[in-house]
Image (spheres, rainbow, N blue to C red):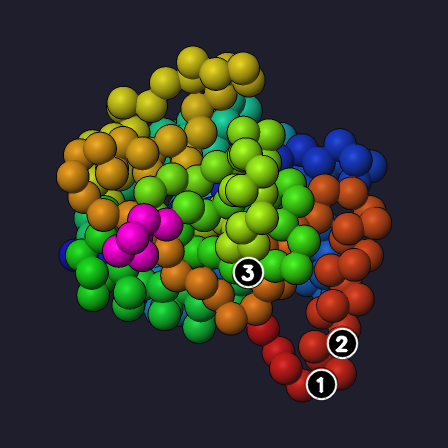
C-alpha cells in the first residue's frame, strides 16, 4: 500500500473571465494545476486522479501534454454537477479502491503548496496513525478562512468556518488550507456517510473530519512553514497577486 493524490480541478472560475477551468490559469509560465502536479510528483506520488468539471476537455488535453513531457499518466474523474468538495471526492471512489494506503486531497488552484510540506505532513500523519490530517497555515489576516480548533492534546477537534465562528474563534490565526491526508480506507468508510443537509445543499469534505473523530480516530494538523500555502485565486486581481509572489520567489531563487 502506498500514496496517492486527488486534485480538485473542476472549478469554473467565472470571475476569471476565461473559457478554461480556473486551475489552468497561469502563474508565471505554467498553469496553477501544473504547480500542484509538480509538488505531488516531487513528494514521490505518481498515482494521481484529477477531478474535472467545467470545460473538462481543456484539463484532459493538458494532462495529455503533461504525460508526453513527464511520462506520468494521470487519471481523471468527472464531476458532472458541482455539489461540493466531498461530492468531488466521491467521484473518485474507483480510484481510491484501486490505490489503497493513504491519499492526499489538494486544490488545483493552490500553487504554493510545495512538495516538502506534502511530505512532512505525510510523515506526521503516519507517525501518529491518524485517520486524517489537515494541512494548515498561520496567517496575519484569517478572515474568510476556516479556523483550526485544537483540543488539549493538540489534535483537531473541528474546523469552524468564518460565518459560524464566535468572537473567540475568529481570533484564531491557524487556518485550513483545504488540503488533507487521509487513511484511504477510513476515507472510503466515511464518504458514504456524508450528507448535504446544509444551507448550500452541498457535500463538504470537511464534514468527513467530524465523522472520523466521532469514530474514535484522531485528526491531526500539520502547520505549513509558509502562509502562502493557503493562497488561491478566484479573480484576476488575486491571480495577479499570486504571480507577484511567484516572481519575487523566483528572483530570490526560492523556488517552490
- Determine the CA span between mark 2 and mark 3: 21 Å
Magenta-drawn stretch, dominant element (helix, strand or loop): loop
Q: Where is 24 relative to 94, above or below?
A: below
Which of marks 3 and 2 precedes in the sequence? 3
The answer to whether residue 103 of the structure is visible from this angle is no
- Determine the CA span between mark 2 and mark 1: 6 Å
Q: Where is 150 relative to 92, above or below?
A: below
Which residue sits furthest bottom? 253
Front-most of 157 and 39?
157
- Determine the CA span between mark 3 and mark 1: 23 Å
Find residue 59 and report its image quarter.
top right
Q: Position of residue 128 (x, y in %)?
A: 20, 60
Front-most of 214 and 197?
214
Q: Is residue 79 left or right of residue 191?
A: right
- Residue 154 in magenta stretch: yes
Q: Position of residue 175 (x, y in %)?
A: 52, 51
Query: How many neighbours does mark 2 have within 10 angstroms: few (below 14), some (14-19), or many (20 or more)?
Result: few
Q: Residue at x 81, y 57 (%)?
A: 240
Q: Secondary structure at mark 2?
A: helix
Front-most of 139 and 29?
139
Residue position marked by numbered label 3 in the rendering: 138
Query: How many neighbours does mark 3 have within 10 angstroms: few (below 14), some (14-19), or many (20 or more)?
Result: many
Residue position marked by numbered label 2 in the rendering: 248
Residue position marked by numbered label 1 in the rendering: 252
Question: Do labels 2 and 1 touch, CB within 8 Å?
Answer: yes
Q: What is the magenta range?
A: 150-155
Q: Secondary structure at mark 1?
A: loop
Q: Where is 100 relative to 127, above or below?
A: above
Q: Residue at x 67, y 86 (%)?
A: 253
Query: How many neighbours does mark 1 have within 10 angstroms: few (below 14), some (14-19), or many (20 or more)?
Result: few
Question: Do labels 3 and 1 touch, CB within 8 Å?
Answer: no
Q: Position of residue 1 (x, y in %)?
A: 16, 56
Amino acid at each position: 500500500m502506498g500514496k496517492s493524490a486527488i486534485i480538485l480541478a473542476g472549478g469554473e472560475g467565472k470571475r476569471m473571465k476565461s473559457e478554461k477551468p480556473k486551475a489552468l490559469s497561469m502563474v508565471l509560465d505554467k498553469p496553477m494545476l501544473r504547480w500542484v502536479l509538480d509538488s505531488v510528483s516531487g513528494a514521490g506520488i505518481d498515482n494521481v486522479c484529477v477531478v474535472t468539471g467545467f470545460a473538462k476537455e481543456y484539463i484532459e488535453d493538458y494532462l495529455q501534454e503533461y504525460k508526453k513531457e513527464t511520462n506520468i499518466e494521470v487519471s481523471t474523474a468527472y464531476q458532472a454537477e458541482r455539489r461540493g468538495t466531498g461530492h468531488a471526492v466521491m467521484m473518485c471512489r474507483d480510484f481510491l479502491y484501486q490505490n489503497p494506503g493513504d491519499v492526499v486531497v489538494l486544490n488545483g488552484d493552490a500553487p504554493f503548496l510545495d512538495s516538502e510540506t506534502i511530505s512532512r505532513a505525510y510523515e506526521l500523519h503516519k507517525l501518529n496513525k491518524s485517520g486524517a490530517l489537515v494541512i494548515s497555515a498561520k496567517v496575519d489576516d484569517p478572515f474568510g478562512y476556516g479556523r483550526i480548533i485544537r483540543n488539549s492534546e493538540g489534535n483537531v477537534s473541528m474546523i469552524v468556518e468564518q460565518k459560524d465562528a464566535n468572537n473567540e474563534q475568529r481570533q484564531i490565526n491557524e487556518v485550513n488550507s483545504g488540503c488533507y491526508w487521509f487513511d484511504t480506507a477510513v476515507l472510503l468508510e466515511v464518504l458514504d456517510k456524508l450528507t448535504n443537509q446544509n444551507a448550500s445543499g452541498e457535500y463538504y469534505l470537511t464534514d468527513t473530519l467530524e465523522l472520523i473523530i466521532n469514530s474514535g480516530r484522531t485528526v491531526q494538523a500539520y502547520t505549513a512553514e509558509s502562509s502562502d500555502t493557503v493562497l488561491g485565486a478566484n479573480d484576476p486581481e488575486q491571480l495577479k497577486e499570486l504571480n507577484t509572489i511567484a516572481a519575487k520567489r523566483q528572483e530570490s531563487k526560492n523556488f517552490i
